[in-house]
Image (cartoon, grey):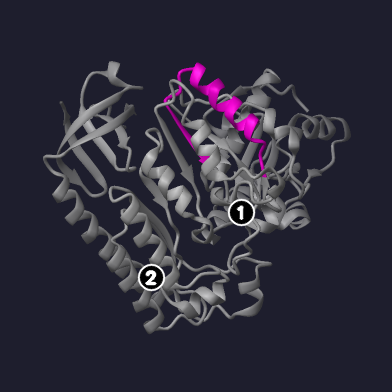
Amino acid sequence: MKDLNTFYIRTYGCQMNELDSEILITQLKARNLAQVETETEADIILLNTCSIRDLAEKKVLGKLYEYKKDKKDKIIGICGCMAMSQKETLLKKFPHLDFLIGTNNLLDITKVLDDFLSKNTQMKKLDIDYEKELENFYATRDNKIKASIAIIRGCNNHCSYCIVPQTRGKEVSRDSKSIINEAKYLANLGYKEITLLGQNVNSYGLDKPDQNYLFPDLLYDLNKIDNIDRIRFMTSHPKDITKDLMYAIRDLDKLCEFVHFPVQSGSNKVLKEMRRSYSAEEYLEKVNLLKSITPNATIGTDIIVGFPNETDEDFEKTYKLFELIEYDTAFIFAYSPRQKTYAARKFEDNISNEIKQKRLQKLLKLFHSILEKKYKALIGSKKEVLVESLNKDGIYLKGRTREFEKVIFKGDKSLIGKLQIVEITGFSYQTLKGKVI
C-alpha cells in the first residue's frame, strides 16, 4: 500500500449528509490529507450515501461497479445511509470495497483507516446509537457565509416508505448549550446565516421532557446571538409544527419566513398507509393557521406520487390540495420501494412507471404555473437578498431572499456575504432576476 496523501469525497442526498461530509473532511485534513477534485487523483475515495430514493442508491452502486474495473491501489469507503441499510451485503457484493462508516460513527474515520491499513481486511463501524462526541465537534466549512448546524439526529416517525429510522436511529436532541456555542463560534467567524438541521427539527427536545426546552425555545435563544443575520431550519414533520413555532417565525427578526411543510399526499387513505399520523384536513388546518399568523411566510413541501394502490382519485386529491395551498417550493418524487421498510414488505409496487411519471409531470406543470403567477406578481417589489456568490458564468451575483427564493442580479463582488436590497425585474424558471437598489 502506497503512502496516503489525498482523498476524494462525493456526497449524495440531503443537507444533513453535506454536514456529515464536512465533519469527515475536517478529520481527514487534520490527518494531513489533501482533498482533491477527481477520483483519479485520490488515494482514498469516500462516497457519503443516501437511501431515501432508489436513484441515489443506483448512482452509488454504479460507481462501485466502475471502481471494481479499475481500483488500482486506492482505498474505497462507503459512508452514510447505504452503509447502514445494506451493511454486509455491500461488503460481500463488492470485495474491493474496503470499509463502511455509519451515520453515527463519523468521528471514527481515522481509526477505521488505521485499522484497515494495519489489518488489510474489510472494516466496518456501524453503530445505531447516537455519537455524543459529535455535539462538540465543529466542522470546517468551505462556504464562509452560510453554515448548517445539526440540532437533532435520528427519527421516531417510522413513515412506511422511509428507511431513515433504520439508518440514523432514534431521535436524540443535541444539548442546547452546545448548539448555541457552535452558533456563536460561527458568528465570530463571520457567518451570516445558519440552518438548523434534523430529520425532524420540530421534535427537538421531545426526547428530553424533563428539560422543558423545545424547538421554539431554542429559536428564541439563537435569535439573541450577535452578527448572525438569518436563521433557517430544515426539515419539519407537520404533526410537530406548533402554534408557538408559528409565533416565533412571526416575531423573531432573524428567523426566515419559510417553512418546509411536507404533506406527501392529499389522500387520507394514502396518508394512513404512509403512516403520516395526520389527515389532509388536519394538515390544511395547520397551513391556514400558519398563513393567518405569518401571512408573508412561504411554504415548501415534499410529495410522493404513485404510492402503492394510489388511485386516480387519490392523486386528484393531492393535486387539488397543491392547487389550493399554492406551494412556493416543492420536491416531487415518484415512489420507489426501499428495502426493509414497512411499505416494501406490506404493499406491492403496483403503479406503473408510466402512470407515476404522468402524475409527477402533471404536478410539476401545476407547480410551474403557480410559480409563474407568483413571480409575475413580485416584479417591481423589493427583496432583501443575502448575496452568496457569483453564478456559474461569473456574470451575476446570486443569493436567496428570506422566503428562500433564488435571485440573480448584476453587482460588484464586494457585495458577497452582505445583505442587499434588490428590485425584482423578471424571472426565469425558478429564479428571480433583479437589480441593485
Q: Amino acid at mark 2?
A: Gln
Q: Which type of secondary structure does the marked residue at label 2 adopt?
A: helix
Instruction: Find residue 145 and report its image quarter.
Output: top left
Q: Residue 259 placed where, x, y %? A: 41, 50
Q: Which type of secondary structure does the marked residue at label 1 adopt?
A: helix
Where residue 357 is drawn, which disc sits there?
A: 2
Given contact means CB atoms under 8 Å apart, are the residues at marks 1 and 2 in contact? no
Instruction: Find residue 401 and report its image quarter.
Output: top left
Question: From this viewpoint, which residue is outermost toward the right?
Answer: 119
Whether residue 5 is visible to the viewer of this picture, yes or no, is yes
Residue placed under numbered mark 1 in the picture = 61
In percent of the image, x 28 and y 67: which residue is there? 324
Q: Over which residues does the magenta segment extend?
A: 173-196
Q: Quadrant of the N terminus?
A: top right
Q: Quadrant of the C terminus?
A: top left
Whether 50 is drawn above or below 36: the answer is below
Q: Magenta stretch containing residue 307, yes or no?
A: no
